[in-house]
């Protein structure tokens, strides 16, 4: 019995007035008594771990990242190296995914394609954070006329289909030496931050009336401090969920644009290009379209599972 | 009896006027609906195709003809034939059609097919002022005069030299049934040419009143075995048997539907599900399988697949650069691994299959069969280094242009890689829809572009005379005076040996200057249902449905 544990009942004393000691001052000490406190984030991680699909999705994304970075480096072939004597090879040990119509190793090309898909994903996520969150936050925080104007701009941009933007950019940059991939990036940049702006606006509209925001305002915190230090961190749950659901949509858009010939230019291969090339030979050589299609589907599933899991995990109302 | 349906992959038929086509695929419409004065071939009479090597000509609208001793005057006697609107086909219709095709305001790409007619070229190149035509004025040195109007150089007419189309052109209807043709020079293959779409008649009564006659099914009056009854642009064309056709008893098919499908694999899927009986293009990756199963046939085709080089642009104005590009292509690899249709690597320009001066000999084999070696990387590298780009160092990046098609894309990707690997030159690929691609080509708005040429008639001249200075299809900016002179000489002479010698010499100049990079000689793989009998497509690509039937 340690004498320095003051909150123990003193021996011989019955509980009653004066038998209580003050609660400990430090939280470490308190934890021995109450167990670890669950914070918002640790609770979320704990819950997402129970969601098997989300975990699978997470690990697929990690694997994809590793393959995209390391794969093309360790492959004995390059994505553009042709071998006209070994065209349309069925999958073998030398070429696990077979070879295409110009004898290029399909596995290397699929791995290389994942770089483009991930680049698109990263660009999309970055723009979502940079433009979408800031834009929606400013719009909601200042409200009134600012909000009206900013949201009408969003409405207008919403009305323009991505496809039309890409086609117009292709015409605009024709003969300017601009890579078609840049067109895809610009188109994604122009359209993919819009849902984020709306979601962040909705969150901030309710958060800015809460006590902590009013308190910050009362003690004279500047607007950008209130917005970026107090409001947006509190909207992080919906933001992350939106990002994880927007990324696959952007990746799919790139694949789709490449499929119809508006994406990357040969010999660079993105999944959409590979699928498009493979479709031509689908009757005789179905594996050529199978692997890029599988890669696209797996990535879509992985991000969507993770996004769904995060949405459940980060929703405070679902907290157990 | 039954329906025959043929599909065309080409989706850009914009106008059916027989004097303004642009692409081989479009020609076959002309043969389905219109008929020229005679058609050749020992297969069947009719509007399909042209003369066979045997030199046998089959009369069509022209019942008979006589040729003068100097081989410059032709007198055609026409049979009783009728347009789809019931009026008779007359010699006046021929005269009108030919002059119309030649007139400068129509600006037909194929007007040169009528340059053989006396005064044809002069008329086509004349300048219209008001309702009269004048020769272009020349300066003291004999160079054509132009003046600046805005950004454009406009030719100046010489108002003293008028061309009167009613007098100065060697085609005249003597009466409704007799057509007299006077040629510029004796042209041995002139009868072949009369089966060519540009020389087909148009109904004067209809066309002279309506410029847009060929854009609407209602006003589209023709004289062939089939008539167009429905045309949904970019979708399909429906032809039915023409009840006013002079030889209608021999026509067995009652209806032919052409679908325009741009994608070859879509066409194959439609063929395999029975929606199509024939298709003009086959996806290359499926070809070996389809040939083995008998669904696809590989027909001979008189044509060459090549790349155009814009010789007005640096660094392509250097012949060493062009030759380096030419030699660094592995044609055997392309034909065996990519096209797979039995194509022959082209080591010269004029394809095999055209008779030379001596009967039974082949133009290709008669003189020099090949002008360079395939995949000659050592020489290519040396030439590129001599041009100042050792291992491709300092070579500007350029664009390789092709018209949208999976086959062209695969070939372009292969060549892009060959140039990169063998020469250290990088180029980017650009695909364009046919109209845009043709526009860029014609305005020399490209560096290197894919092209192909299918012969118009069975003579080397059809391949060679297009490269004369300013030729309608010479989209390279290339010009060589001695080449022009040789082509002119070949046109003026009747002696077959001297003619062929001039053409061989001309080809040699072309292969020395290399404004084009030949890749392979075409074959013509088609999807053809086993039910179609008596199908005939000439080596020039003209489809003849007249005698075909579904068995």
Image (cartoon, coloured by chain):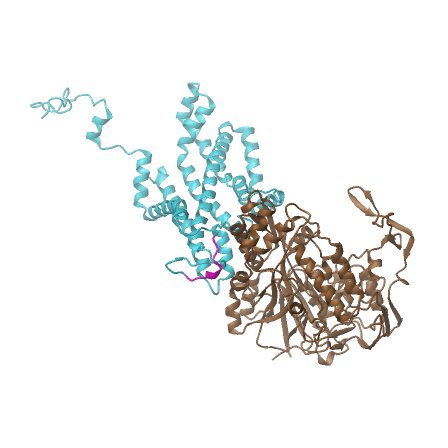
Chain colours: A cyan, B brown
Note whether A204 is above or below B6 in the view shown.
above
- Where residue A216 sits, quadrant-wise, is top left
Residue A235 at x, y = what percent?
41, 33
Note whether A263 is above or below B183 in the view shown.
above
Q: Nearer the viewer, residue B417 or B203?
A: B417
Residue A320 visible to an observer of this rendering: no
- Where residue A25 sits, quadrant-wise, is top left
Secondary structure mostly seen in the magenta stretch: loop
Residue A143 within the segment the image draws in magenta:
no
- Count of numbered labels shown in the rendering: 0
Q: Is residue A245 left or right of residue B34?
A: left
| Quadrant in the picture for the C terminus of chain A | top left
- Where residue B48 sits, quadrant-wise, is bottom right
Q: Which residue occupies 50% across, 62% down?
A: A281
Note whether B57 is above or below B492 in the view shown.
below
| Quadrant in the picture for the N terminus of chain A | top left
Q: Which residue occupies 91% across, 63% down?
A: B167
Q: Is residue B153 left or right of residue B4?
A: right
Residue A313 at x, y = what percent?
35, 41
Q: Nearer the viewer, residue B210 or A31?
A: B210
Q: Nearer the viewer, residue B45 or A255?
A: B45
Note whether B234 is above or below A166 in the view shown.
below
Where are the magenta residues, as a range? Answer: A81-90
């Amino acid at each position: 019995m340690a004498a320095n544990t003051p909150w123990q009942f003193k021996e011989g004393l019955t509980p009653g007035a004066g038998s209580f000691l003050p609660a400990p001052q430090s939280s470490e000490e308190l934890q021995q008594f109450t167990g670890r406190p669950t914070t918002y984030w640790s609770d979320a991680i704990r819950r997402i771990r129970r969601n098997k699909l989300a975990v699978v999705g997470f690990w697929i994304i990690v694997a994809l990242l590793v393959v995209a970075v390391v794969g093309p480096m360790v492959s004995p072939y390059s994505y553009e190296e042709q071998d006209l004597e070994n065209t349309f090879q069925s999958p073998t040990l030398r070429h696990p995914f077979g070879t295409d119509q110009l004898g290029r190793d399909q596995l290397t090309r699929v791995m290389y394609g994942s770089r483009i898909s991930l680049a698109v994903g990263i660009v999309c996520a970055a723009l979502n954070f940079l433009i979408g969150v800031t834009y929606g936050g400013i719009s909601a925080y200042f409200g009134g006329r600012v909000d009206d104007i900013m949201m009408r701009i969003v409405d207008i941009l919403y009305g323009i289909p991505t496809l039309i933007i890409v086609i117009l950019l292709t015409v605009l940059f024709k003969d300017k030496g601009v890579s078609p991939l840049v067109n895809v990036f610009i188109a994604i940049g122009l359209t993919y931050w819009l849902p984020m702006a709306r979601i962040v606006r909705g969150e901030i509209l309710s958060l800015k009336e809460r006590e902590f925001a009013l308190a910050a305002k009362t003690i004279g915190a500047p607007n950008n401090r209130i917005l970026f230090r107090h409001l947006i961190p509190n909207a992080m749950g919906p933001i992350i969920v939106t990002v994880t659901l927007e990324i696959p949509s952007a990746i799919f858009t790139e694949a789709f644009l490449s499929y119809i010939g508006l994406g990357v230019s040969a010999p660079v291969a993105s999944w959409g290009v590979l699928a498009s090339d493979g479709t031509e030979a689908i009757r005789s050589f179905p594996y050529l379209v199978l692997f890029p299609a599988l890669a696209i589907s797996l990535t879509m599933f992985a991000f969507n599972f993770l996004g769904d899991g995060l949405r459940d995990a980060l929703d405070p109302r679902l907290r157990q | 009896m039954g329906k025959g349906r043929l599909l065309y992959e080409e989706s850009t038929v914009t106008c059916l006027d027989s004097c303004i086509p642009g692409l081989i695929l479009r020609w076959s419409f002309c043969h389905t609906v219109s008929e020229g004065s005679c058609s050749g071939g020992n297969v069947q009479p009719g509007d399909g195709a042209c003369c066979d090597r045997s030199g046998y000509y089959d009369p069509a609208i022209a019942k008979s003809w006589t040729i003068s001793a100097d081989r410059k005057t032709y007198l055609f006697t026409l049979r009783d034939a009728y347009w789809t609107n019931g009026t008779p086909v007359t010699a006046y219709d021929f005269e009108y059609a030919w002059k119309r095709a030649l007139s400068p305001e129509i600006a037909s790409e194929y007007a040169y097919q009528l340059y053989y007619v006396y005064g044809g070229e002069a008329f086509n190149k004349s300048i219209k002022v008001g309702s009269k035509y004048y020769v272009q004025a020349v300066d003291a040195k004999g160079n054509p005069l132009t003046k600046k109007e805005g950004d454009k150089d406009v030719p100046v007419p010489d108002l003293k030299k008028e061309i009167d189309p009613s007098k100065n052109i060697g085609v005249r209807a003597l009466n409704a049934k007799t057509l007299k043709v006077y040629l510029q020079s004796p042209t041995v293959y002139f009868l072949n040419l009369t089966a060519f779409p540009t020389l087909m008649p148009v109904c004067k009564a209809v066309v002279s009143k309506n410029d847009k006659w060929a854009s609407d099914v209602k006003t589209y009056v023709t004289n062939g075995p089939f008539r167009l009854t429905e045309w949904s642009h970019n979708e399909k064309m429906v032809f039915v048997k023409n009840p006013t056709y002079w030889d209608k008893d021999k026509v067995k098919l009652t209806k032919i539907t052409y679908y325009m499908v741009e994608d070859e694999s879509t066409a194959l899927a439609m063929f395999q599900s029975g929606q199509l009986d024939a298709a003009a293009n086959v996806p290359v990756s499926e070809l070996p399988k389809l040939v083995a199963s008998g669904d696809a046939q590989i027909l001979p085709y008189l044509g060459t697949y090549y790349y155009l080089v814009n010789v007005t642009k640096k660094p392509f104005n250097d012949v060493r650069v062009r030759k380096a590009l030419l030699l660094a292509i592995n044609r055997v690899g392309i034909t065996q691994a990519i096209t797979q249709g039995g194509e022959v690597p082209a080591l010269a320009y004029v394809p095999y299959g055209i008779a030379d001066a001596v009967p039974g000999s082949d133009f290709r084999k008669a003189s020099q069969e090949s002008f360079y070696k395939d995949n000659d990387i050592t020489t290519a590298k040396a030439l590129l280094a001599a041009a100042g780009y050792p291992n491709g160092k300092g070579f500007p990046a350029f664009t390789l242009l092709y018209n949208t098609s999976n086959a062209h894309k695969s070939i372009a990707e292969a060549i892009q890689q060959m140039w990169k690997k063998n020469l250290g030159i990088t180029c980017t690929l650009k695909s364009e829809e046919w109209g845009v691609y043709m526009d860029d080509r014609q305005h020399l708005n490209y560096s290197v572009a894919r092209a192909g040429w299918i012969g118009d008639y069975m003579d080397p001249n059809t391949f060679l005379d297009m490269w004369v200075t300013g030729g309608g299809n010479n989209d390279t900016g290339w010009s060589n005076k001695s080449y022009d002179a040789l082509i002119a000489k070949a046109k003026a002479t009747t002696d077959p040996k001297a003619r062929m010698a001039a053409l061989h010499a001309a080809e040699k100049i072309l292969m020395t200057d290399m404004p084009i990079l030949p890749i392979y000689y075409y074959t013509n793989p088609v999807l053809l249902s086993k039910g179609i009998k008596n199908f005939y497509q000439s080596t020039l690509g003209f489809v003849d449905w007249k005698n075909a039937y579904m068995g």
